[in-house]
Image: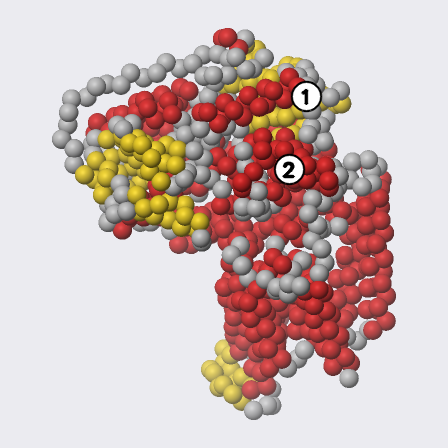
Amino acid sequence: MNLSFKASQIAPGAWWLLGLSLAICAGISSSAPTLLAIQTLAVFIVLMAREDAPWSRSLLFYVGTAALVVLIRVTFRIIFNFDSPDQVALNLPAIRITFGPLGELDLLGRVSQSSITTALRDGLRMSAITLSIGMANSLANPRRLLKSTPAALYGVTSSFVIALNLAPQLIASARRIRLSSQLRNASNRATKGLMLIAPILEDSIDRSMALAASMDARGFGRRGSLTARQVRFSRLASLVSISALASGTYFLLTADAPWATLVTFAFGLSGIYASLKISGASNLRTRYATHVWQINDSLVAGAAALSVILFALGALR
Amino acid sequence: MIQTKSLSFSYSNGAAPTLRRINFEVQAGEFVLVVGQTGSGKSTLLKALIGLAPHFTGGQISGAVEIDGQVTTGLPPHEVAHLVGYVNQQPEGAFATDTVEEELAYGMEQLGIAPDEMRLRVRNVANLVGVSDLLNRPLETLSGGQQQRVAIGSALAAGQKIILLDEPTSALDDSCALEVLQLLKRLTLEEKLSVMVSEHRIERLGSIVDRVLELRGDGSLVEKLPSQLQVAAQVDRTSSSPIEQECMLETPALGLKYGNATALHPISLRLNSHSITSLSGDNGSGKSSLLWCALREAWRQNKAVAMVPQSASDLLILNTVSAELSAAIATNPAGERRAAKILERLVGRIDPTSHPRDLSVGQQLALALAIQISRNTEVLILDEPTRGLDAEAKSKLAELLEELKNEGHAILLATHDHAFANQISDENIHLIDGRRAIEN
């Protein structure tokens, strides 16, 4: 038995399950050490499991984003701060802006210790979520994930291909454009610094579009013998059920409505089942080499489920 | 199998139509060649037949396309995919999977071929297009020519009765290109496949194709007989009087490894002024690797060097052709005018406001060449500088390189086009599996 936990040995779905679970845990948790632990864990997993693939090169990007999130959250808190009786940590000169009849706004001024701690914790939570999603995105091969995508979602294919491919493509494009400006002589004003952002974005979108076009031309998203009505229904069902799952997650995070959570989740799952049933019925596509779900996949998925259950229990207590 | 009725297409409202009231018919078992100058609309025609235009390009289509008896005008590509196979002009951007084997199977998966049948066909097709040894290789590690074979193989494996190929041999050397085209010919005879191919290298196609459709620059289409295929006259080499050459770049032995695989065994290069050195060799023999090594070495030695990589469109990052041309100014005051002149000389006038992305592959290459050549560097490195150029543009490029050589530049280029290499180069380095073979 081969217990490998390298990125490509695990089903991309399992990586996403783990990433989403960590994100949910981060959403539930409110202690700074726990949030830091989740962040460290996410980065650690990427470092241990990643292989040399284009989408695995994005770790630094996510770490940077996560740091930026914390920084912005705390800075905003210091700038837009409300006078509170707590212990004052920072005593900054206050700036009062008056909006005539609309009232006035105080900026800076006395910043309490507790407001900084709260801001820091909020920032850490958001950055932990960022890193968890980033982990899944760095480890799951977007093309393989796309292949295991339920046929019901094929209806929105092109946008799907573009969306999934965009993050890795951005990084590839950045490299390419940097090389191009190097080849054309770096001293060239038109191809320097901030000027590169637009070409990088444009290039990523162009290339993702080219990929979507190629996949489309080879039959990806084919309707086959399904009638237009079946297609419409399955598309609608998958959209509605995904929205239901999203709001279920929201209820779970706000944690005040266990019944609403259960009902929306159940509704979402049954909707997806229905749309899978319809689009799966016509046997349109086949798979060349299927990834056989193995014990290491189950371990990753199991760890994901376990962490969510533990955190949820902890939050309910 | 394919029939068009008054098919017209234009990329934007009010622009001159790229295709103008085109009528033609392709029967089962016919091998049809589409020719036309760089930018005349060959790719657009193929895209319009399968719905990629306008679904992925924007623009307006009118008239009717009928495929296998069904009217398919207006249908998105995925609803036509089971009837027509399509091979993109630039395979590297079109791969949907990670390895050669998966890519060969991709089209079949979408069409719902049974797994056992798929495995059988993958083996057969890999043999046919000569990639049997590469089945487990990641696609991004393949050379341009190998990628092209995989793309063709994937379309053949899917097994539709009609196949459209957009310049399928642009990165293949002459013998391999001929092999691929002969394979397609055999399939038209044995399997009654209908094949439409757009090609620039038409020298040896007269005996293979059944019919020729020529797109004229104005969007109209005329039918020709294969015997009427015009081959551009070869440029006579001006026998130049011996000139004092000086060494522009001398490199230590350059080698390159990817992980455990050796892409290039150490080779040292000496590039002289007033000379053109060409690299030849099979697909994957290390030509591009050697060029990149030479470029890095030239950078290291602080030499003035310009390179046009194999995917020339990589160089183009601005919004309009004129912006690209004027970006050439910064390095050389006369750069913009010079670049514009070179571009016009190679492929004729191009609307300066058009987006580089919307140019044909050949036009993009010409633009990249114009920009880099106008920098007037001592050393010029070109990777496959003829890919996507028509015969006329190619002979213009040969003239241009000859002039640059006489001005004293040192030129190093890799090409699979033997005729082109023989025509212009003073020295040839032949590579076999990353090793230097013959010199003459």
Nearest to the observer: residue B387 or residue A10: A10
**Kind of residue at disc 2:** Val
Q: Which mark is residue B122?
A: 2
Q: Quadrant of residue B376?
A: top left
Q: Relative to B296, say whether B320 is above or below.
A: above
Marks 2 & 1, CB-CB < 8 Å contact: no
The chain under label 1 reads: B
Q: Residue furthest front?
A: A1
Q: Quadrant of residue B235?
A: top left
Q: Measured from the top left, where is residue B143 in percent x and y?
A: 47, 39
Within 10 Å of disc 1 (Cα), the crowding (few <14, some 14-19, many 20+) is few
On the question of residue A190 being in view, the answer is no
Q: Is residue B408 left or right of residue A269?
A: left
Nearest to the observer: residue B314 or residue A68: B314
Which residue is drawn at the image coordinates 75% and 20% (left, top)? B69
**Kind of residue at disc 1:** Glu
Which residue is drawn at the image coordinates 50% and 22% (left, top)? B178
Q: Which mark is residue B191?
A: 1
Q: Quadrant of the C terminus of chain B?
A: top left
- Mark 2 lies on a secondary structure that is helix
Sequence-first tag of 2 and 1:
2
Cα–Cα span, label 2 and label 1: 18 Å
Q: Relative to B423, say whether B98 is above or below.
A: below
Within 10 Å of disc 2 (Cα), the crowding (few <14, some 14-19, many 20+) is many
